Amino acid sequence: MSETRETPLASWHRDHGAKMAPFAGWDMPIQYEGILAEHNHTRNAASVFDICHMGQFMLEGGGAAEKLARAVTHNLATLKEGKCRYGFLLNEKGGVLDDLIIYRLGADRFFLVVNAACAEGDFAALSARVPGMVTDISPRMGKVDLQGPASIDVLEKLLGQNFHDLGYFCFRECEFRGRPLRVSRTGYTGELGYELYPPRDMTEELWIALLEDERVKPAGLGARDTLRLECGLALYGHELDTEHTPAEAGMDGMLTSTAPYVGHEYARSIKSQVLVAMKLEGRRTVRSGDSVTLPGEAAVIGKVTSGSFAPSLGYAVALAYVDKEYADRDTFALTAGRSSLIAGKTELPFYKNGTARIKF
């Protein structure tokens, strides 16, 4: 068994009472004050999240743009310098190997951020598809996410510059105390926020500086999960996996690239199942792996991918893959232990008041 890895903030987390648990091979903070409190604080003020476990790659060299466009679903033809884009790394059958964000640093220079659990496989796949151009810079980098409606004021105060002109899914090269810091207006909470990329040995200094602002509190992966689920954001290994295409996950609208990328023939196909958003009555919830049936029937027609009480809404929500012939039904039954809970089909996002796309 491989050894559990630690982020550069692991000691800080333990010293400040974080509940730690393994996640994607890393020892990560799940909560500090509590998931509900951290969730609500992020929605109303600002929180910092340790996301140093994510993989970070550089991809550069002559012809990199054309070669990368054949490796991923991102439309690089329309991606300008200073902007980033979400998309997928697919297998030959259109299944999702990972979802990732690609930053355009230059004509043939790209920065890629991938999921921790997929990083090793992603690096191997990209190295095979774009040989000699990919470098894993994860060991020398950190990642801190500042999220919440107060985040812009916190960031401007800390770095001493204007960020009101930085648009959604745009980034800027900055400095923090004389050292480089990439600031990206992106996140995973549905709120206005910024993903910060410092050198690894500067991560704790940046983290502490952010927390010196009284509006900022630390938050763990527990709140990050409830925040992302309320906003209908997919989690790899749950809504996204090698068995389902982007179209089955409801993300075919993102497939605008005309390049012959790996898996493009199947990326828009719905083979057997469709991801369905569901609202439950009350606070009782279901978990990933629970079965989906039709009310009063025993035949299993799907499986829950994510489920939780939604603190911002006051009731439970779930995402589930359902056999395509039943996906248009209005009502489903979800197993929760020995009980069956009735869920109604709804639309994403569950929570519609997030500030992520706010314009200044």
Image (tube, rainbow, N blue to C red):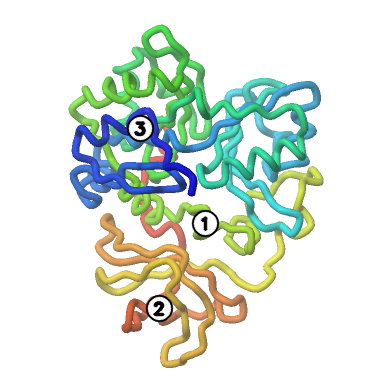
- The residue nearer to you, when weighing 168 against 209, is 209
Quadrant hosting residue 307: bottom left
Q: Which residue is mark 1?
A: 237
Whole-number angstrom distance, CA of label 3 to CA of label 1: 24 Å
Q: Amino acid at mark 1?
A: Gly
Q: Residues within 10 Å of mark 1 (few under 14, many from 20)?
A: some
The secondary structure type at the circle numbered 3 is strand
User: Do the residues bearing badges 2 and 1 touch, measured as CB atoms within 8 Å?
Assistant: no
- Numbered label attached to residue 334: 2
Give x and y (percent) for residue 249. Answer: 58, 61
Q: Which residue is mark 3?
A: 146
Give x and y (percent) for residue 168. Answer: 49, 34
Confirm whether residue 247 shows in the render.
Answer: no
Q: Work out whether mark 3 precedes mark 1 in sequence or the reverse, and give the earlier one.
A: 3
User: Do the residues bearing badges 3 and 1 touch, measured as CB atoms within 8 Å?
Assistant: no
Q: Amino acid at mark 3?
A: Leu
